[in-house]
Amino acid sequence: MQTEVTRLLGIEYPIIQGGMAWVAEYHLASAVSNAGGLGLIGAASAPCKWVREQIQEAKKLTDRPFGVNIMLMSPYADEVAKAVAQEGVKVVTTGAGNPEKYMKMWKEAGVKVIPVVASVALAKRMERCGADAVVAEGCEAGGHIGENTTMALVPQIVDAVNIPVIAAGGIADGRGIAAAFMLGAKGVQMGTHFVVTKESQVHENYKDRIIGAKDIDSRVTGRTTGHPVRALRNDMTKKYIELENKGASFEELEELTLGGLRKAVVEGDVKNGSVMAGQIAGMVKEKLTCKELIDKLVSETDALIKGAGFYV
Ligand code: TUI
């Protein structure tokens, strides 16, 4: 499975683990990198000190490349952006914004930069300012999302830029990876399936909620506030959507979700917390190790790409 993405990043398989807030910590990231993919530490809204410690711990557990995802709405984004360059992190991905102002610093430090984008316009802008690749994330994904589906977004971005495109959103098995390749992607990023891996440190209640989810179990909150977020339905999403339909203020809605992801990931409160997950949760049925998952993804994809069963 050598592609432009494996060559760019010096990894074995073009499979990137999403930089999920509260979920993507060093145990998970190093396990994914050791299994031949690219593990990411999700800086989310965490203080810079936490991110530095995570990077140092990951370095102890893997000699292979790993990356850091910078959530651009974080109050610590400026500090973390500098820290990753100083710590010699090989790859940075960004989410929930435009990372243009950090690009020069990262390129000078030799960091490979892969912004996550949800539109053709931002993909083109990222290519112009020196991005090495982009992740095109469709709205099947969990967490903060854009408007377009992966099926519609990926080929439009592939046509618009000359850098490699990595598909994300709605991918959980070899069929999804093979489909992404057919759309012109040179790699994939997956989140939800990695949440339930053995190395993932999230509360078992969160993992079990994903394993038990059906195809229609996710909801999007925050469409009215301009911050749409996909999570599995529960008391929180129900209340949120009711309030939204009543025209509640941004502050009222924020109060409902404040700390919600931590509540679900750390405390296991999957009723009142925010159980962010993609539409593909309904397909995730097993808690595998990262190596078992990646080996399974690679053999499923290989079988499809090499033609076995492709035309039957
Ligand atoms: O960033 C993500 N997913 C996330 S971030 C996150 S933390 C959070 N928690 C609660 C509320 C809000 C965020 C949870 N999940 N994915 C990458 C992504 N980026 N998806 C969509 C975008 C995006 C959207 C708009 C990127 C850029 C953009 O516009 C930037 C601009 O200036 O044009």
Image: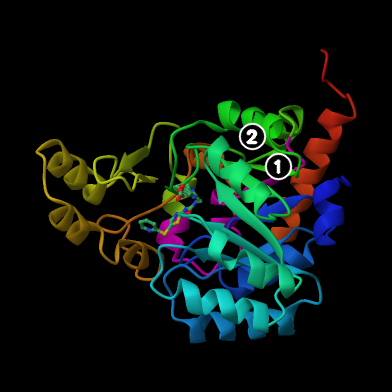
- 169 and 270: which is toward the camera: 169
Image: 58 above or below 209: below
Dot 1 falls on a residue whose secondary structure is strand
The answer to whether residue 25 of the structure is visible from this angle is: yes
Which residue in the structure is indicated by mark 2?
157
Which residue in the structure is indicated by mark 1?
165
Dot 2 falls on a residue whose secondary structure is helix
Q: What residue is at 60 percent from the left and 59 percent from the top?
A: 197
- 108 and 152: which is toward the camera: 108
Report the amino acid beneath label 1.
Answer: Val
Contact, mark 1 vs mark 2 (Cβ under 8 Å): yes
- Split into 4 quadrants, where in the image is the C terminus? top right
- 251 and 106: which is toward the camera: 106
Report the amino acid beneath label 2.
Answer: Ile
- Position of 312 with respect to 42 (left or right) is right
Image: 312 above or below 67: above
Q: CA distance from mark 1 to mark 2?
A: 7 Å
Q: Which residues are magenta?
A: 185-207
